[in-house]
Image (spheres, rainbow, N blue to C red):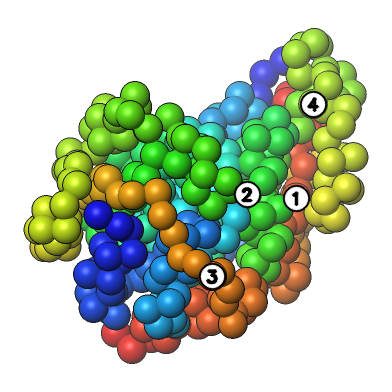
């Protein structure tokens, strides 16, 4: 299964959510499906996508927040899983695409390769109750639907192939993304 | 030496007066009484992190959400947060109002704090992070308000350095 396939399955659900992605392939694959103002692409600061998601979710309880994370980024902020567990925002879905690779920075194996490190077990051990690991499109779809209906903090670890897009590039400067994302969040807030 | 009860109270009152409703923090000796107040205040959301860099992400989320939020940490914690400060806050133009306990400077008895204290100002200067020292309880409330205002207008990290004079009795 490829991450792009999962993101494409999820895409129709993202219109009314706040979405934060990590750098590189995940950001590009979402962008290539069509940028929306409610998408924020964290193109650096690896590890902090889930922390941004936590900050959004805790302060916007009426919104549903989805973080598209990766194994390499999560490994840089394992403590963040414990912080998520402690504050347990009901409106946060943390999806971790685990390709076992630092794909965007040269394709070196990450610690999750060959089953050495189990991110779902780490998330459970951090204290997150609803954690599932999936490796097929059908299971991913089911897990995503369940998580979005659950009204509780959920983590889905998705085993995917270490492949990414052929081309990288966005017609969106980084501060522009931040300004527009903030404006979008504020407009949605005002409309409620 | 003990942490100043009165000045911790004054600082918390300054935070409240600046309109702050949310704090991310990693507990630190000098910040203990302050964080206790934050925890006990039903109108203040306190988010304790496992490592300070998380607080930069949380602060970005709070900023997008429109929630007045500050970060409380020790200077050594700021060192651990540097990539987030540079590659999230500065790169994207996201304000950070940081109140930083500066350990390891004038009067520091503990050897383990000293290197960090010695290099703190140089690191802030190297990153073009504006900073002021808070030494006087009469002025700290105004300084918190000013740090908050400047972070929001400059869309930049700003540091108010909480010194020994202020934090210890």
In the picture, which quadrant includes the C terminus of chain A? Answer: bottom left
- Mark 2 surroundings within 10 Å by alpha-carbon count, few (fewer than 14), some (14 through 19), many (20 or more): many
Q: Residue furthest front?
A: A166
Q: Nearer the viewer, mark 3 or mark 4?
A: 3
Q: Secondary structure at mark 4?
A: helix
Disc 1, disc 4: CB below 8 Å?
A: no
> What residue appears at the point 30 percent right and 57 percent down from the top-left corner?
A2
Q: Nearer the viewer, mark 4 or mark 2?
A: 2
Chain label for disc 1: B
The reply to the same-chain question for discs 1 and 4 is: yes
Q: Earlier in the sequence, mark 1 or mark 4?
A: 4
Toward which corner of the image does residue A143 lie, by quadrant? bottom left
Disc 1, disc 2: CB below 8 Å?
A: no
Q: Nearer the viewer, residue A109 or A12?
A: A109
In 3D space, how far apart are the residues under numbered discs 1 and 4 (Cα atoms)? 16 Å
Q: Which residue is mark 3?
A: A167
Note whether residue B11 is visible: no
In 3D space, how far apart are the residues under numbered discs 3 and 4 (Cα atoms)? 43 Å
Taking the image as shown, residue B89 lies to the left or right of residue A21, namely right
Q: Nearer the viewer, mark 3 or mark 1?
A: 3
Disc 4, disc 2: CB below 8 Å?
A: no
Q: Which residue is mark 2?
A: B84
In 3D space, how far apart are the residues under numbered discs 4 and 2 (Cα atoms)? 19 Å
Chain label for disc 4: B
């Amino acid at each position: 299964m490829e991450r792009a396939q999962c993101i494409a399955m999820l895409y129709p659900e993202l219109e009314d959510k706040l979405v934060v992605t990590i750098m590189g392939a995940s950001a590009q694959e979402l962008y290539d499906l069509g940028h929306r103002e409610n998408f924020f692409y964290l193109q650096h600061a690896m590890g902090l996508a889930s922390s941004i998601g936590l900050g959004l979710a805790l302060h916007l309880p009426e919104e549903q927040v989805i973080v598209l994370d990766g194994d390499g980024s999560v490994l840089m902020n394992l403590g963040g899983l414990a912080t998520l567990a402690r504050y347990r925002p009901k409106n946060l879905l943390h999806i971790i695409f685990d390709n076992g690779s630092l794909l965007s920075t040269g394709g070196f194996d990450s610690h999750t390769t060959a089953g050495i490190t189990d991110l779902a077990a780490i998330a459970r051990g951090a204290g997150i109750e609803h954690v599932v690991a999936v490796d097929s499109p059908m299971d991913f779809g089911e897990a995503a639907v369940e998580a979005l209906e659950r009204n509780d903090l959920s983590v889905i670890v998705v085993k995917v192939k270490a492949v990414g897009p052929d081309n990288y590039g966005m017609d969106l400067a980084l501060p522009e993304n931040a300004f527009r994302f903030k404006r979008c969040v504020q407009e949605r807030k005002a409309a409620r | 030496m003990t942490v100043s009860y009165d000045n911790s109270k004054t600082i918390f009152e300054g935070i409240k007066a600046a309109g702050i409703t949310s704090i991310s923090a990693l507990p630190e000796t000098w910040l203990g009484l302050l964080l206790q107040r934050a925890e006990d205040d039903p109108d203040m959301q306190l988010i304790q992190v496992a490592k300070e860099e998380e607080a930069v992400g949380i602060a970005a989320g709070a900023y997008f959400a429109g929630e007045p939020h500050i970060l409380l940490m020790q200077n050594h914690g700021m060192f651990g947060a540097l990539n987030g400060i540079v590659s999230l806050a500065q790169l994207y133009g996201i304000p950070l109002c940081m109140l930083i306990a500066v350990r390891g400077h004038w009067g520091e008895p503990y050897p383990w704090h000293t290197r960090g204290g010695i290099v703190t100002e140089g690191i802030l200067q190297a990153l073009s992070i504006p900073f002021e020292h808070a030494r006087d309880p009469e002025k700290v409330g105004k300084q918190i308000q000013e740090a908050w205002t400047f972070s929001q207008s400059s869309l930049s990290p700003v540091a108010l350095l909480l010194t020994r004079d202020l934090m210890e009795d």
